[in-house]
Image: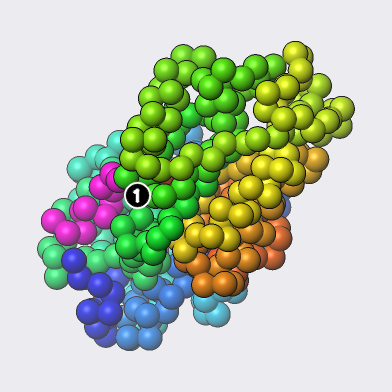
Amino acid sequence: MKTLRDINFNHKKALVRVDFNVPLDDTFSVTDNTRILAAKPTIEKILNDGGSVILMSHLGRPKGKEDKFSLRHIVPELEKVLGRKVRFINDCTGEDVKKAVAGLKPGEVLLLENLRFHPGEKQGDENFAKALADIGADYYINDAFGTAHRAHASTAVIARYFDKEHKAPGILLEKEINSIRKALDKGQKPVTAIIGGAKVSSKIGVIENLLNKVDNLIIVGGMAYTFLKALGNKTGDSIVEDNKLDLAKRILKEAEEKEVKIILPVDLVVADKFSNDAQTKIVDVHHIPDGWQGLDIGPKTRKLIDEVIQNSKTIIWNGPAGVFEFDNFAKGTEQIGLSIGKASGNGAYSLVGGGDSVAAVKKLGLTDKISYISTGGGALLEMLEGKDLPGIVALSD
């Protein structure tokens, strides 16, 4: 697979798939420009070579052409990040787009309208992909890791219309691939993974793949209660997938056979209702009262997890330890972030991904302490499962 460094874009036009699916406020101003900043190195490389850039992205989940999802709203923020004028056109295929691309001069940037205004984008439609490929670009660059697991027209199908010499991953996508592989396949031992979130069912593949990669697997969040119940504990009103108890038992047995240490909570913060202002108490996992539910890990568990993390050389974290959106049940998630930050400072390699995990790292000001923060949600999970992502495979074909 070619890399961006292998290409000189002098007087060439690059069609770059970025992930500008950014949050907007009521006045359509960008409230978090992380994804725009993440694409900046790729854009600058092309422009500095003397090339021009055509940017394409999706925004939200529009039903037809809804103005609130128009990418024109992000032009001011994009111009601020890039420090240059950005041209915008209110479509992404067709004659007007071809004319705009033909008129691009070296150093210029053109932003196309929301790809999902066309149903063919999510459908992976060949005709729509071909129309995108025909707007007049010399190269196709995919720098949208967040959508690399989707076989959409702009991520997987379009790549068929560019040969190996004229397509490549962007700097961000390449960094994502290398960072995840470094943690999963080349990680210095001991390797520890912390997996959280609500349900075991959403992360079965991740857990099963990690059992072949890690020395320690820490299971927290809502999914932990299914494992605790499988071990014979009463779980009160805590979230449990009763139809996954046998699966949990099988995973625990498989971990034992593979000599992977599974770490589950030993104490919990329980509440009498699912609310930030609920009554709370700390109990050990054997004594969750009827009518109460676990919403965070307790202090003994936080200490236990910290000890495992400090003794690890490679750390992978995806998913919260509790109901992170409630401040009173965010301590466990925040402590994991602090522990990983400390271990990273002492030389461990850390990879963090997933909405709440990344939010915790940012909230605690630990962004610079973590070795790599992934921009992908579903894409990261699929790589942790060991799957090949369509948007990445397409760049090699």
* In this rendering, position of residue 125 left or right of residue 355: left
Q: Secondary structure at mark 1?
A: loop
**Residue type indicated by callout 1:** Lys
Tell me residue 229's x, y (percent): 57, 20
At x 53%, y 60%, the residue is 311
Where's residue 260, x and y in %?
A: 40, 43
Q: Percent from the top left, x then y, of residue 92?
A: 36, 54
Task: Please tell me which residue is depicted at 47% across the width and 63% down the height of the picture.
Answer: 313
Residue 337 x, y percent position in the rendering: 63, 56
Is 11 drawn above or below residue 159 in the view shown? Answer: below
- The N terminus sits in image quarter: bottom left
Quarter of the rendering occupied by the C terminus: bottom left
Which is more toward the observer, 72 or 287? 287
Residue denoted by label 1: 213
Q: Is residue 387 magenta?
A: yes
Q: Residues within 10 Å of mark 1 (few under 14, many from 20)?
A: many
Q: Is residue 80 magenta?
A: no
* 132 and 194: which is toward the camera: 194
Q: Quadrant of residue 74?
A: bottom right
Q: Residue at x 41, y 50 (%)?
A: 215
Q: Is residue 363 left or right of residue 382?
A: right
* Residue found at x 51% / y 14%: 242
Q: Quadrant of residue 122?
A: top left
Q: Main secondary structure of the magenta part?
A: loop
Q: Is residue 208 left or right of residue 131?
A: right
Q: Is residue 207 left or right of residue 3?
A: right
Boundaries of the magenta span: 386-397
Looking at the image, can residue 205 be seen? no
